[in-house]
Image (cartoon, rainbow, N blue to C red):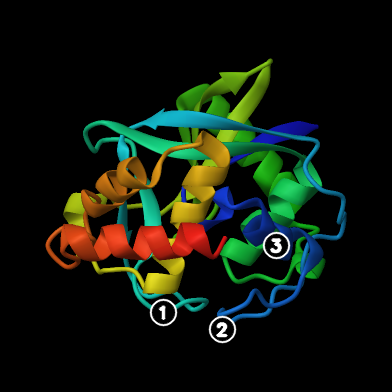
Amino acid sequence: MLAWYVSYGSNMHAARLGWYIGGGCPPGGKRTYPGCRDRRPPSRSTPVSLPGGIYFAGESGAWTGGMAFYDPHLPGEAAARAYLVTLEQFTDIAAQEMYRPPGDTVDLIPATGAAIDAAVANGRATLGPGRYETLICPGSRDGVPLLTFTAPEGASAVPCRPPAPIYLGMIARGLRESHGWPAERIATYLAARPGVAGAWPPDAVAALVEKALVNS
């Protein structure tokens, strides 16, 4: 079975997703990933837009600062990137997002398969109570479901928190790489996200984006 893994955060940057697939610790990160059991790269990727938006909340164990989450009830559209992967790879990526070791996910594969079926049927399913354990299916492409993970609650139910600069810069590089946006559009998009808005002045976001794109 194939699935489109849809990333709206740092994994929009293909090299960042590569650490989830191949394992290791990305530069500037604080976490080492075990990687997927199947280490082949995604067979395809494509830019997508999701109804709703992203917000930043919680505490990232990889970067510090707030983490990106998707809320389909926010106004506007969330820029994202879809990667075509196998069910096993999707499950292993999910396990690493949930801080579960991929090698111990034999039981998670059928659970993920059942959750995918439920998400396709209902638009939403739950793999667990924690962060990135809520599965959302915003549609399909080429007959294959588009699937992403997020938190169980929306932006209005939690305190938003600004992301770390290195994390926001990674998202900026992913937006350029996947959507081809110019720096000004990326900065405007990120500066308006809950967790960034009100915590990062727009000119500081613009400067960070410029620096991230120069160094990408």
* Residue density around tag 1, few if under 14, some if 14–19, many if 20 or more, within 10 Å: some
177 sits left or right of 110 in the view: left
Residue 66, given in percent of the width and then of the height, sits at 34, 69
- Tag 2 or tag 1, which sits nearer the N-term? 2
Disc 1 + disc 2, Cβ < 8 Å: yes
Is residue 49 something that shows in the picture?
yes
**Nearest the eye: 180 or 15:** 180
- Residue at position x 71%, y 51% from top? 91
* Residue density around tag 2, few if under 14, some if 14–19, many if 20 or more, within 10 Å: few
The residue labelled by disc 1 is: 64
Vertical order, 82 against 67 (above or below): above
Name which residue type carries label 3.
Tyr
- Residue at position x 26%, y 68% from top? 162
Determine the secondary structure under disc 1. Answer: loop
Q: Given the current orientation, which residue lies at the most extreme front position?
A: 214
Is residue 158 something that shows in the picture?
no
- Tag 1 or tag 3, which sits nearer the N-term? 3
Check the picture and name the quadrant holding the N terminus: top right
The residue labelled by disc 3 is: 20
Q: Which mark is residue 30?
A: 2
Check the picture and name the quadrant holding the C terminus: bottom right
Name which residue type carries label 1.
Thr
